[in-house]
Amino acid sequence: MSGGRSGVGGAHQRPVIVGFDGSEDSRRAVQWAARHAVAAGLPLVVAHCWVWPLFTQNLGPVTYVEDSGLQREAEKTAAEGLELALQTEPDVDASVRLVAGFPSEMLTRLSTEASLVVTGTRGLGGFTGLLVGSVSLHLAASASCPIAVIRDEHAGQGDILVGVDGSPESERAVLTAVELARTLQTSLRVLHVRAYGRNVPTRLDEPSEDPIIQQALDLLPPDSDLGVTVESLSDPSVPGVIVHHARGSACVVLGAKGRNTIGARLGSAVHAVLHHAKGNVIVVR
């Protein structure tokens, strides 16, 4: 199933793909994704994953019941997501994909053809009180492109905060954060939380003396007029510092795992930030 209307973006560009299941969290994700797609000049794909074809061939319609059946319900949910995107941004170049399979698996597959995959914190299958659902965590650990986990459907007026630690994922996070700051026409804030120790200064008077900060600054385009601030802190809780500094930011961008994460697909600091940050988080692999 596909549909939509032409607008900003082009078929040759990798689209923004957003998962939609009808939940309030996924509605926020669609709204944010529509605004971001228009700002970035990219097409938007609203993806609805449904599992019933894996379990039954009786997908409808029900005899003598018009507009019924499991497939029709899935199509209506997908159409609802598309309509929400168009209501949010009438000029968005939006279409729909209805895919059979579990959301975590199918969105991971779709990430190979996306510039960004957007998801809400929890879907309809999430447990009450769970801060981040299994689909979002799976995507953060496995997707082939950056993942945006959305709590606030508005882009926000703050800066873009990027946490750095010198890892390859951290370097890619810096590049993603630069593009996001440009798209939102806002500034960039680079934060490094250094190892904590009794003789380690809590805050550096000259953060650029921190080699990890300098490594991040070296990635910035030399001709960029992007406003950039930097901060180098020492604290026993890396995620605690990031969550604190993320308040007031439009988004926090992090590499999926850090230098000290061996064998894991998602670092403990990123896992904690996904659970406790009040705003939107983008994870870069």
Image (cartoon, helix red, strand yellow):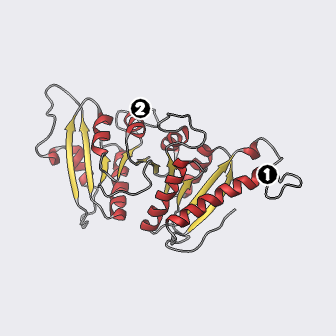
Q: Residue at x 32, y 40 (%)?
A: 243
Q: State the separation of the CA atoms marked 2 and 1.
A: 47 Å
Q: Nearer the viewer, residue 171 or 235?
A: 235
Q: Nearer the viewer, residue 174 or 69?
A: 69
x and y percentages locating residue 280 in the rendered image: 40, 49
- Between marks 2 and 1 in the image, the one whose residue lies nearer the viewer: 1
Q: Is residue 106 left or right of residue 150?
A: right
Q: Earlier in the sequence, mark 2 or mark 1?
A: 1
Q: Callout 2, which amino acid?
A: Ile
**Which of the 4 quarters of the picture holds residue 204?**
top left
x and y percentages locating residue 135 in the rendered image: 55, 41
Q: Which mark is residue 262?
A: 2
Q: Which mark is residue 121?
A: none
Q: Residue at x 77, y 41 (%)?
A: 55
Q: Is residue 11 above or below residue 137?
A: below
Q: Secondary structure at mark 2?
A: loop
Q: Callout 1, which amino acid?
A: Gly
Q: Is residue 199 left or right of residue 75?
A: left
